[in-house]
Amino acid sequence: MAPGPAHDPDGSEKTASGVAPPPKDGDRGPGTVRRAGWILACVVTVQFLVSLDLSLVNVALPAVQNDLRLSASTLNWVVVAYVIVNGGFLLAGGRTGDLLGRRRVLAAGLVLFALASVAGGLATTGWPLVAARALQGLGAAAASPVALALVTAHFPEGPARARALGLWAGATVAGGAVGVVASGVLTETLGWRAVLLVNVPIAAFGLLAAARLPADRARRDVRPDVLGAVLATSGMSLLVLGVSVADSRGWTAPLTLGALTAGLAVLAAFVLAERRAADPLVRLGLFAHRAVLGANVFGFLITAGQLASFYFVSLHMQRVLGFDALSTGLAFLPFCLGSVAGMIAATRTLARVGPRAILVGGGLVGAAGMAWFGLGGPGGTFWSDVLGPSLVAGVGIGASFVAMGSAATTGVPAEDAGMVSGLLNGFRLVGGAFGLAVLGTLATTVTGHAADPSSAAAASAGYNAGLLAAACLLAAGALFCLVIPGHRRT
């Protein structure tokens, strides 16, 4: 196998002659400039849709359970099925886009996602709904890595990519926040089925934008890494399964331990296989690139803290402050506004200060906002417990996502864009499942040790413990980003 590209100390990639690799034909030429609007529309739509569905069903779950008469275990699988399949296939989905053509893989993922949403919205029993959620996860695993890959492939490093990453980050953060808002509003006004069916028009617009993407051809000079794809998909799926069921079944349950052990063993085999593969699914040398390493670790930790925080804050507002589903959803709007402000600031300063400064600063600001959430309690109000921390956390997290995308793609050649995107999205999704399971267990333990576990004060104590732990995870991620090389003007 020919040696891979080298990386200089500031994180940029070089060829053997010491010169940055030129863009591939068609990647960043005039056709790309003319279609930049459609590329960005596609990136934003896909990333918003995939992020939306990570949180969209959460507030609707009680209505789903009552209507379909689901057991607690079946209801849990409505969430877990999406996460497992999505996480398991992300690496394969990203690399498939590189090899078979991003436009066709993206379109296939969106069609599958839309059809699965219709099937889920029409389900009359539990397991067809679970199957539909799994197919949604598969569609998301095909489409989501392509979204970030399109930014890497078509926008050169500098202000143009910073602006594109700002939109990608905005769609990512806004999708998760709007998912909570829309879940409450749609469930209260139209019923839980609308929570799934609302995906169809969004996916349809994504298909319209995908049809206007620059044409790309399948690469015939690279052999698909079938063994790596099988091992990565199996290992990631088992790992996400183990983490996802730990909260409900316990960390020492046979299913939890078995899935985690098997997942780690399969991923170890995957690493060995990739070292010998001629055209690997993931080039292990990427982890020697400090910007890529920092971005992936940060992505794992920020998603672990963010998804768990959304979960705890939503429960706090409903069970402690007495909000209904609609009010709970609307109360997340300040977070969205803070995120927009943070992303605008990061987009304007990224090219000047570099991703490390924004990741460290934004991550610590986001952690402060999460910790502020963890100080609420019974008797609080929206003004005292929600508004301030929402704005602070939103600003920090919004800025961090822009810089995270920049660090993860710095110096990466266009032909490997899907590989890097699948890697980042995989780390984020496993981090989200890890955060919900570990911090959920922590919150349940704290609540169970209270004098009256059923009281609002006990519930608040559990949520506060989870939120403070989430703040620690995000702060650790921010500090880890100090490994990223400092920005150097060129």
Image (spheres, rainbow, N blue to C red):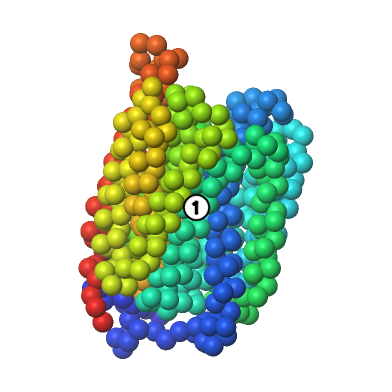
Instruction: Left or right? Give the position of 300 relative to 83.
Output: left
Instruction: Left or right? Give the position of 260 relative to 187.
Output: left
Residue lying furthest top: 451
**Position of residue 239 measured from the top left corner of the image (x, y, whole percent):** 47, 44
Quarter of the figure with residue 62: top right
Quarter of the figure with residue 141: bottom right
**Which residue lies at the image location 51% right of the left edge and 58% below the top edge?**
171
Q: Residues within 10 Å of mark 1 (few under 14, many from 20)?
A: many
Quadrant the N terminus occupies = bottom left
Instruction: Left or right? Give the position of 70 relative to 122.
Output: left
- The residue wearing badge 1 is 174
**Which residue lies at the image location 72% right of the left edge and 29% below the top edge?**
68
Vertically, is 463 above or below 347? above
User: What kind of residue is marked 1?
Assistant: Ala
**Position of residue 424 measured from the top left corner of the image (x, y, whole percent):** 43, 59
Front one among 103 and 1:
103
Q: Is mark 1 on a helix, strand or loop?
A: helix
**Which residue lies at the image location 28% right of the left edge and 43% below the top edge?**
368
Q: Could one spot residue 152 in this view of the protein?
A: yes
Quadrant the C terminus occupies = bottom left
**Which residue lies at the image location 52% right of the left edge and 87% below the top edge?**
29
**Position of residue 142 measured from the top left corner of the image (x, y, whole percent):** 59, 60
Q: How many labels does the image show?
A: 1
Residue lying furthest front: 383
Vertically, is 1 above or below 192? below
Q: Could one spot residue 292 in this view of the protein?
A: no
**Position of residue 212 measured from the top left corner of the image (x, y, whole percent):** 65, 75
Front one among 316 and 272:
316
